[in-house]
Image (cartoon, coloured by chain):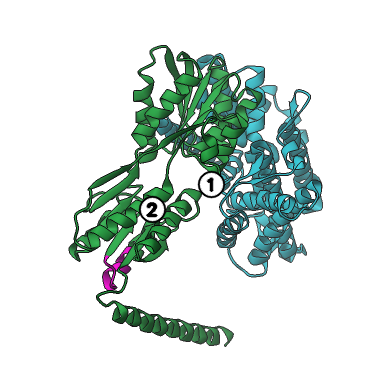
Chain colours: A green, B cyan
Amino acid sequence: MKSSVFQKSATATVIAALVIAGVAGCNRVSTTGADSPPKIMLALSTLNNPFFIELRDGAVAEAKKKNVNLIVVDAQNDSANQANQLATALSGSTKAVIVNPVDSDATGAPVTALNKANIPVIAVDRTVNGAKVASFIASDNVAGGMQAAKNLAASIGGKGSVLVLQGVAGTSASRDRGKGFAEGIKAYPQITVVAEQTANFDRATALDVTTNLLQAHPGVTGIFAENDEMALGAIQALGSRAGTSIMVAGFDGTDNGLAAIKAGTLTSTIAQQPGKLGALAVDQALAAATGKKGSSIVAVPVVSVTKSNVGQYIK
Amino acid sequence: MTTTVKAHKPSFKVQRFLSNNGALVGLVVLCVVLFIATPDFLTGQNILNIGIQVSTVAVLAFGMTFVIVAGGIDLSVGSVAALSSMAGGFLFTSSGVPGWLALVGGLLIGLIAGAVNGLASAYGKLPSFIATLAMLSVARGLTLVISGGRPIATSPEVSFLGSNIGAIPVPIMVLVVAAGIAWFILNRTVLGRSMFAVGGNSEAARLSGLPVKRIVVTVFALSGLFAALAGLLLAGRLDSAQPQAAVGYELDAIAAVVIGGASLSGGVGRISGTFVGALVLVVIRNGLNLLNVTSFWQQVVIGLVIALAVGFDVLRRKSRRS
């Protein structure tokens, strides 16, 4: 039968692949001598997103500089994938693991296993719940939210009514940015937040939500979006009013966002430094792998980008 | 059948109309509630906003109606919409194809993706749920491959789909034309009537001489084509093709078709019902925004309305049967 031939050949291929992988694995173990570069795993949540691509690039560059054998794996936003990938670090010669959790809670169990095996774990961008991490490296989203409030307030003259477009409900990025913005905007008693609605960090959703909100609140002069994608959706909804009668503040400093700042439709954004996150994570992992004590929390500063300094950030 | 209806009293006619149009009644109730709750709901501009916002999901759902009437399901429409708009953008920006041709190319990609679904379902004997689930993943993956994970600028022809002619938004015009075409196909062509036959009882349709396999391929190809049109509409409104566009829209499309009175077991469905179903979804989201309902509760409300609309429909059918 056709299928059985196919199954046999497939089985043979799989076995062959396993054998080759096994041999390769043994080779790797045997080359891990005293002065060979330490092996560190970088387990990313996804590489579908420019932010994490930049984070990886920063980590790879730093690893090259510090002579680290960096293994990069991508969980494709699937917690189960990530758990499997983290488990592979247990069996190898991995000295430290940098994890960017798909989900902070779901990563707890696989990281606990790494804790038991005495392999230090560094969390980057999102933390791990229910397990020990040697260090947590993230952008300061709360401070970024406060800066965004300041930028928006300055652009609308410290008074008026504003809308807030929130990210995916329940995510730490949305929570922290929203919290920072709310704290920051308190300093301006003449500014009122007339509506807060979610647009799920998505451009198309933000277009519809902003259009709807402008019906209920035609008098707004400012919009804060918790990421640049939503800010760009809001700008699409505003048309010619964006940057002229209604000011929009975003967050992230994506390529599209920076281009919109240059064009004058986006008034300000908060640039994260994903490359720096990656580089610092490698530094901390290296310190932990060699038994040095790093810092338990590293808050990477965020920077305000407006038309006056956008030139430095556009690539 | 018409003669027996004529013989009845007008009150019975009204009752019959109401029971045949549960979704429409629900929509009217929803609109009245929103009209009372907020003065911003029933304004000219808000009606236009709703029209624009319903265009994408309604066009997707028209294609889905064909598939569901023919007894299948198409989970790939959101991904196919994204792939088509991305292919259109890519042809224009990276391959230097003229804008109108890139637009046609995008539509063609959708048609092909749909036809592949149909072939896998009719000739490959895969259940359509599985065939289109595979396409959901493949089409989204290809979208990311083409785009490298970044948004792509679109041609002026695609951007035109998101603009206005005078005071009338182009998406609304496209919506009306697409609804007309979909209605015509389903109700006035042999193909359309065959969809009901295939969905009602595929084996009986085959025995009575209908080319069931070819019909299934055509139905999925049409769904792909409508998905592509929806994707290009969305890209026009955003002035760019987004790699993560239309994620999860297949569920909106299915919900719209089912709220509109179609049966997931096939053989029942109407384009007008689907349009009302899509309107219900969009009006709820619009109203929740206008009322500034928090995001946590929005999801709860939308889920409850879908369950209520369909649950009401099931009850109504049961009571009519007994």
Q: Tell me where residue A213 appears, x and y as whole percent.
A: 54, 23
Residue identifier under label 1:
B248
1 vs 2, front mark: 2
Which residue carries the number 2 mark? A278
Q: Which residue lies furthest to the top in this view?
A: A190
Task: Write down the region rendered in magenta.
Answer: A86-95
Q: Is residue B130 left or right of residue A15?
A: right
Q: Position of residue A187 (x, y in %)?
A: 35, 17
Q: The disc labelled 2 sits on which kind of residue? A: Gly
As shown in the figure, which amino acid type bears the numbered disc 1? Gly
Identified at 33% across, 57% down, the residue is A282
Q: Residue at x 27, y 69 (%)?
A: A90
> Could you tell me which residue is drawn at 71 percent across and 59 percent down?
B112
Q: Does the magenta run of residues contain A47?
A: no
Secondary structure of the magenta portion, mostly?
helix
Q: Is residue A176 among the parts visible in the rendering? A: no
Quarter of the view holding residue B22? top right
